[in-house]
């Protein structure tokens, strides 16, 4: 099969013919319809993820149809259209049995622990536990994003942040997760104020329905004023910047909550005295388990949420190496259609 092959960290990959996939008993092989180019893929390519071993095929955010099933797969069959959370839990540990596969200690991640979806085919492991059915009428590009950025934003808002209709949510960072949060919050009856240093990214957030946008360089007082009502009850940090985490905490109202989603580029300086004095909550969120997908898929199925609106650029597999090396433009969401 054809696949994007990384042979050196930080070195532009190439598209190569690689060996076909031999399906594991607990896995399926999926013909890839579309796969998102996520910031995490770039981190892996740069060598920031210790689990990535060279040579390597990136890609973890995907949709496609099953072409082969392992002998121990019973819930899915050839021809099914599926996606998967980027964390594939083992299905048998205590965390998986309690519905928390996103923190499974034995997790597999396509594109990190084994070859990913920047290819014509990808193998998805622990299939019965992790696969999520995708309706035929959902746009492939948007459906691919359900595997990572959209699901990650959904759980950060609902499972960790407890978003409510009428809430005004501060979203820090207008990348893939932040823009997904704008769409999802709107679908759930909440409003968003987006803080991002890029005018282009702020404009994209406004296009997708953000109530207002603000340059974080204006400081916490200006951000709190943009949110109104004394600051945010809920903030989602999706920029992955230490200064953004600090800003988000300072822009919360008393007893507010910040959900940290972005992978930080450096250790943060957390304002602990302020957190104590105002009883702030800082919590992490790592993707979403397949068990938590039904409410998200209901939003998609009823038309309240259209993840295809996030897509700004569709490219071929041959264009993927250069796109991975270059990184996204502000506000850009790219999907690869092999």
Image (spheres, rainbow, N blue to C red):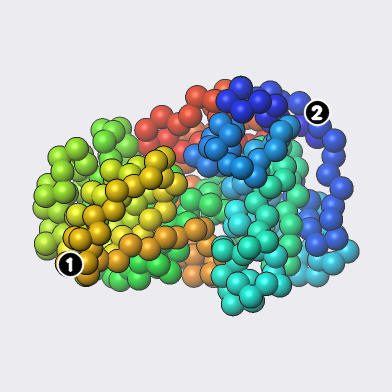
Q: Residue at x 11, y 49 (%)?
A: 221
Tell me: 271 left or right of 28. left
Q: Quick check: can you spot residue 333?
A: yes
Q: Nearer the viewer, mark 2 or mark 1?
A: 1
Residue 263: % across, % down: 44, 47
Write down the residue under mark 2: 17
Q: 186 or 245, which lies in front?
A: 245
**Mark nearer the N terminus (2 vs 1):** 2
Image height check: is 312 above or below 211? above
* The N terminus lies in quadrant: top right
Residue 31: % across, % down: 74, 46
Residue 166: % across, % down: 24, 68
Check residue 30 in the rendering and tell me which mark sits there, or answer none.
none
Write down the residue under mark 1: 278
Tell me: 324 left or right of 332. right
Tell me: 196 left or right of 284. left
Q: Residue at x 46, y 38 (%)?
A: 333
- CA separation, marks 2 and 1? 57 Å
Q: Residue at x 66, y 25 (%)?
A: 8
């Amino acid at each position: 099969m054809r696949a994007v092959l990384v042979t050196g960290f930080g070195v532009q990959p190439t598209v190569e013919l690689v060996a076909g996939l031999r399906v594991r008993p607990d896995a399926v092989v999926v013909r890839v319809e579309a796969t998102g180019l996520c910031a995490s893929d770039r981190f892996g390519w740069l060598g920031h993820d210790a689990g990535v071993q060279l040579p390597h095929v990136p890609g973890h955010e995907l949709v496609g149809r099953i072409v082969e099933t392992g002998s121990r797969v019973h819930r899915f069959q050839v021809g099914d259209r599926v996606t998967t959370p980027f964390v594939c839990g083992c299905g048998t540990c205590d965390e998986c049995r309690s519905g928390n596969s996103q923190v499974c200690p034995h997790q597999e991640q396509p594109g990190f622990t084994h070859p990913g979806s920047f290819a014509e085919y990808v193998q998805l492991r622990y299939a019965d536990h992790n696969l999520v059915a995708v309706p035929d009428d959902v746009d492939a590009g948007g459906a691919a994003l359900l595997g990572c950025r959209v699901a990650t934003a959904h759980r950060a808002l609902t499972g960790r942040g407890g978003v409510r209709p009428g809430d005004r949510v501060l979203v820090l960072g207008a990348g893939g997760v932040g823009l997904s949060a704008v769409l999802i919050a709107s679908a759930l009856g909440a409003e968003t104020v987006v803080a991002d240093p890029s005018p282009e990214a702020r404009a994209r957030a406004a296009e997708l329905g953000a109530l207002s946008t603000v340059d974080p360089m204006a400081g916490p007082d200006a951000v709190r004023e943009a949110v109104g009502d004394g600051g945010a009850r809920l903030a989602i940090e999706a920029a992955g910047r230490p200064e953004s985490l600090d800003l988000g905490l300072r822009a919360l109202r008393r007893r507010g909550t910040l959900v940290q989603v972005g992978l930080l580029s450096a250790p943060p300086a957390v304002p602990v005295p302020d957190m104590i004095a105002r009883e702030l909550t800082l919590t992490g969120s790592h993707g979403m388990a397949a068990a938590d997908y039904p409410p998200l898929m209901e939003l998609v199925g009823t038309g309240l949420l259209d993840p295809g609106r996030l897509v700004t650029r569709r490219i071929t597999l041959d264009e993927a190496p250069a796109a991975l090396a270059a990184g996204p433009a502000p506000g850009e969401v790219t999907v690869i259609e092999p």
